[in-house]
């Protein structure tokens, strides 16, 4: 399988949730992608081809301690997710010839293969203590995916859902008790919730359009997702106890890739502004950002420049993203090329499983 792409000189940045303290963490000629940050903001893992083949790396949020965690030669290692406590990392690798899921300690030790068959296993989400991993797989039915759970030590692998249609993009709550996911079993992709013990399966949204890419808070009480309203992608939030749904964004721009913090109070997302993708922070409850009082459902613009990868939220108030290292403005590239590039990147998590194949290295 060829290395993922096309990406050019994407670097990892970190910024505080009040928009201050922006810092570039990587500076190399490779593509540094899909950063994941631990709960206190001290550790970031990502994948990069800075040394040729794609490997998993870690780096401290102060920019020190860059360390490769994998070292394969004829394989790619991609899409890492670090637990909130920083103890474990889940990731994908085709080191056996097909993409499988793996886990390891965040120092690179105790590498464990979690899946061992010819299915497509991806979108790993890890609990805060690093003990439980949710993912989707088509191992039981070609073309459709189901949600699976596995312990990070490789034991306890089992199928969590058994529904018609495609069930994908699972996110596990920090306390390890719930999994939110999207399913098109009713005709459109809707947001569903299930306990990690298999109980309490519930449909949370009932729309005539696709509801996608859920993100869940620590105790599973709040889920954010993206939907389409009047032709534009908007961010929604649902209370899992009451079923109440609120619309967080309401504009004639596309807003996508939402991520909620552990408390359920802050939602980060990407939004198109004047043709460029910016980072935003939504405050669900009255609070402060950068010392200024922010009413409910108001937004703070975090980064007034082009950003080209999904945001990761940290409970401690730090955001992580990948940005094109060159200064970018309307004169840098033809605007239609920029739009196509951004649209492809924004949809990578949703569509990459449909485009992946199991060809030999």
Image (cartoon, rainbow, N blue to C red):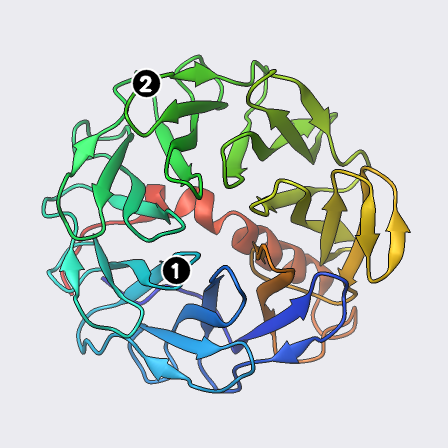
Q: Residue at x 41, y 69 (%)?
A: 45
Residue 22: percent from left, percent from top: 69, 75
Work out whether residue 274 can be spotted. Answer: no
Q: What numbered label is drawn on residue 82?
A: 1
Q: Can you see residue 257?
A: yes
Relative depth, front residue between 88 and 180: 88
Per the image, label 2 sits on a secondary structure element best described as loop
Structural crowding at the residue carrying mark 1, measured as other residues with C-alpha within 10 Å and reported as few (<14), some (14–19) or many (≥20): many
Between residue 343 and residue 23, name the one nearer to us. 23
Is residue 231 found left or right of 308 in the rendered image? right
Quickly name the residue at label 2.
Answer: 199
Q: Position of residue 111 (x, y in %)?
A: 17, 65
Instruction: For marks 2 and 1, give the CA distance.
Output: 26 Å
Expressed as whole percent of the image width and height from the top left, the position of residue 353 reads 34, 44
Q: Earlier in the sequence, mark 2 or mark 1?
A: 1
Residue 179's tag is none
Q: Is residue 84 left or right of residue 132?
A: right
The residue drawn where x is 86% and y is 61% is 291
Q: Position of residue 2 (x, y in %)?
A: 27, 65
Image quadrant occupied by the N terminus = bottom left
């Amino acid at each position: 399988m060829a290395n993922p792409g096309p990406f050019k000189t994407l670097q990892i940045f970190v910024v505080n949730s009040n928009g201050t303290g922006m810092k570039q963490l990587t500076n190399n000629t490779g593509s540094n992608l899909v950063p994941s940050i631990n709960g206190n903001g001290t550790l970031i893992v990502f994948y990069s081809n800075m040394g040729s083949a794609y490997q998993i790396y870690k780096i401290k949020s102060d920019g020190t301690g860059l360390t490769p965690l994998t070292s394969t030669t004829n394989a790619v290692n991609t899409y890492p997710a670090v637990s909130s406590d920083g103890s474990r990392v889940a990731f994908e690798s085709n080191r056996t010839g097909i993409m499988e899921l793996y886990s390891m300690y965040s120092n690179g030790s105790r590498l464990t293969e979690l899946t061992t068959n010819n299915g497509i296993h991806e979108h790993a989400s890890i609990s805060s203590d690093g003990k439980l991993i949710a993912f989707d797989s088509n191992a039981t039915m070609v073309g459709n995916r189901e949600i699976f759970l596995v312990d990070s030590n490789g034991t306890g692998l089992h199928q969590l859902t058994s529904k018609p249609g495609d069930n994908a993009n699972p996110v596990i709550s920090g306390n390890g008790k719930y999994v939110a996911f999207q399913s098109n079993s009713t005709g459109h992709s809707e947001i569903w919730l299930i306990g990690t013990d298999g109980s309490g399966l519930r449909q949370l949204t009932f729309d005539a359009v696709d509801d996608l890419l859920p993100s869940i808070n620590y105790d599973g009480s709040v889920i954010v997702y993206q939907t389409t309203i009047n032709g534009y992608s908007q961010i929604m939030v649902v209370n899992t106890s009451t079923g109440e749904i609120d619309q967080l964004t309401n504009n004639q721009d596309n807003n996508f890739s939402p991520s909620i913090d552990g408390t359920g109070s802050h939602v980060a997302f990407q939004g198109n502004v004047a043709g460029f993708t910016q980072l935003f922070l939504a405050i669900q409850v009255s609070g402060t950002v950068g010392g200024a009082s922010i009413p409910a459902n108001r937004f703070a613009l975090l980064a007034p420049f082009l950003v080209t990868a999904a945001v990761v939220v940290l409970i401690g108030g730090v955001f992580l993203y990948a940005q094109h290292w060159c200064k970018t403005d309307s004169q840098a590239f033809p605007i239609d090329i920029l739009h196509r590039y951004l649209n492809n990147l924004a949809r990578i998590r949703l569509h990459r499983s449909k485009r992946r194949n199991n060809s030999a290295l």
